[in-house]
């Protein structure tokens, strides 16, 4: 994946962060930024200033300036970065405003509400020369990291599968959405599957449906088969209205390779079995034991923040830089398109169509850069503006 250069932070003090969006997840971010010894919270933005003030007080975080305007707060507080924890439909406007102000952005998933908007943000970040990455907090799960180390010992991978079956009663927007499982949840396992095998999606076939007892308005269950680069097949099957024997929130995973298989219940330590002796397997197991199967690195969104900070200090892009995360989001929208049309969707075609939509819908300011941009090619050659990729 070609990623444009971005401006690093050259002062040596803690990074200065503004959090935008003080809802449920915004509170988790306020706590995480507050706990970081190397990042200072300098302000909070929300459409509702009372929500921002209430969140600061509920989190026990020392008061900082609060505003309904990111531009005004940025002028007053001079941040290095913005954490965008607004609702998905606001991600485009908030992140675009931050990038146009010259600020780096760490956004909550999903990158944007649509693929066309996501492409617009990737191009806006490239044009501004600023880092824009997405927090895919599952990548910082110690169990997933341990499973990934085991996968390296399996030789060529044939199949990866995830089963996700739960029965939460959220109330609110998820029960009214059209594609609650695929749009709100499946980005996590889809992105994790790419992280596990280091592959990209090539095609997808998906069926989405709503069990007749479902308490969701939209389809709360789906089954998808992805062809990934290298011929790997990724199978996802899940439901959000599946009471009984529920899986963990990470789902139940199985990876089948040339030399054996690994399974993970999404919570505990993964289990691996080799059918033949494998060079490196003992070392991987020893490393996992030495780490207590977990990882000493920060977990969950603290891991996303640490990766982002490392990138801003070194200029090395994090693994969830937006230009790459586009391919995880394309898995979600490819699955929805396949279910809607009853056809197998080619991810490169989907990205090309989204690119055309992005150019058509762009403001005059961004359109020339969008026209020059090339969608990423699954497999790692691509993305970027005129980069000859
Ligand atoms: N990674 C995870 O595990 C995880 C879990 C939950 C939510 N999320 C993501 O976090 C984001 C926020 O979710 P949430 O549950 O906190 O939502 P929420 O509805 O609880 O809070 C969103 C907040 O953003 C504010 N807001 C909306 N538009 C805004 C705008 N244009 N400018 C400033 N503020 C604005 C709202 O007033 C609200 O306070 C979503 O993208 C969601 O997908 C991620």
Image (cartoon, rainbow, N blue to C red):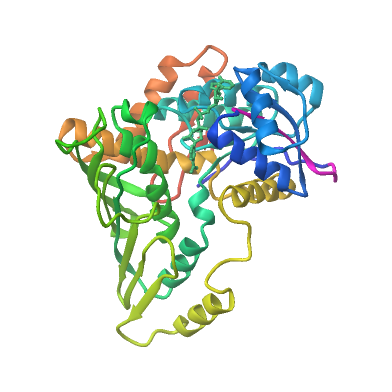
Near-viewer residue (369 or 163): 163
Between 40 and 330, the one lying in front of the other is 40
Residue 15 in the magenta stretch? The answer is: yes
The quadrant in which residue 86 appears is top right
Give above or below for 273 relative to 367. Answer: below
Measured from the top left, where is residue 65 in percent x and y?
Answer: 77, 24
**Is any part of residue 129 visible from this angle?**
no
Write the residue at 66% across / 16% down.
68
**Residue farthest top in this picture:** 364
Q: Is 44 on the left-hand or right-hand side of 203? A: right
- Which residue shows up at 66% across the image and 50% down it? 306
Q: Is residue 4 above or below residue 252?
A: above
Residue 338 drawn at (x, y percent) = 22, 36
**Residue 204 makes an appearance in the image:** yes
Residue at figure coordinates x 50%, y 78% from the top left: 284
Where 162 sits versus 258, above or below? above
Q: Relative to 107, does residue 49 appear above or below in the rendering?
A: above
* Magenta stretch contains residue 66: no
Q: Which residue does the image show at 51% across and 13% down from the upper left?
A: 363
For the record, the magenta segment spans 11-21
Q: Position of residue 359 (x, y in %)?
A: 44, 20
Residue 348, quarter of picture:
top left
Q: How many marks?
A: 0
């Amino acid at each position: 994946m070609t990623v444009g250069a971005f401006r690093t932070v050259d002062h040596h003090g803690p990074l200065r962060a503004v959090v935008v969006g003080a809802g449920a997840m915004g509170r988790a971010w306020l706590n995480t930024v507050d706990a970081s010894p190397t990042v200072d919270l300098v302000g909070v933005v929300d459409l509702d200033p009372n929500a921002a003030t209430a969140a600061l007080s509920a989190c026990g975080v020392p008061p900082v300036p609060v505003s309904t305007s990111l531009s005004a707060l940025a002028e007053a507080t001079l941040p290095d970065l913005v954490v965008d924890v607004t609702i998905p439909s606001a991600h485009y406007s908030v992140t675009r405003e931050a990038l146009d102000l010259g600020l780096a952005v760490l956004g909550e998933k999903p990158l944007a509400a649509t693929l066309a908007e996501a492409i617009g943000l990737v191009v806006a970040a490239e044009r501004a020369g600023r880092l824009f990455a997405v927090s895919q907090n599952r990548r910082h799960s110690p169990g997933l990291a341990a499973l990934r180390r085991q996968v390296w010992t399996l030789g060529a991978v044939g199949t990866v599968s995830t089963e996700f079956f739960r029965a939460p009663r959220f109330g609110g927007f998820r029960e009214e959405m059209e594609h609650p499982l695929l749009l709100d949840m499946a980005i996590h396992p889809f992105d994790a599957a790419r992280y596990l095998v280091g592959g990209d999606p090539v095609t997808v076939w998906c069926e989405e449906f709503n069990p007749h007892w479902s308490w969701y308005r939209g389809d709360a269950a789906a089954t998808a088969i992805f062809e990934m680069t290298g011929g790997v097949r990724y199978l996802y099957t899940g439901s959000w209205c599946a009471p009984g024997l529920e899986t963990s929130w990470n789902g139940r995973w199985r990876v089948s390779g040339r030399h054996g298989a690994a399974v993970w219940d999404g919570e505990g330590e993964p289990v691996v079995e080799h059918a033949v002796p494998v060079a490196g397997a003992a070392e991987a197991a020893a490393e996992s034991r030495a780490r207590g199967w977990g990882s000493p690195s920060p977990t969950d969104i603290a891991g996303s923040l640490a990766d982002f900070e490392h990138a801003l200090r070194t200029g090395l892009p994090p693994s969830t830089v937006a230009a790459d995360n586009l391919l995880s989001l394309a898995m979600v929208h490819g699955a929805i398109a396949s279910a809607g049309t009853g056809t197998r969707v080619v991810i490169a075609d989907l990205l090309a169509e989204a690119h055309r939509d992005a150019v058509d819908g762009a403001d005059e300011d961004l359109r020339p850069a969008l026209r020059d941009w090339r969608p990423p090619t699954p497999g790692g050659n691509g993305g970027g503006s005129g980069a000859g990729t």
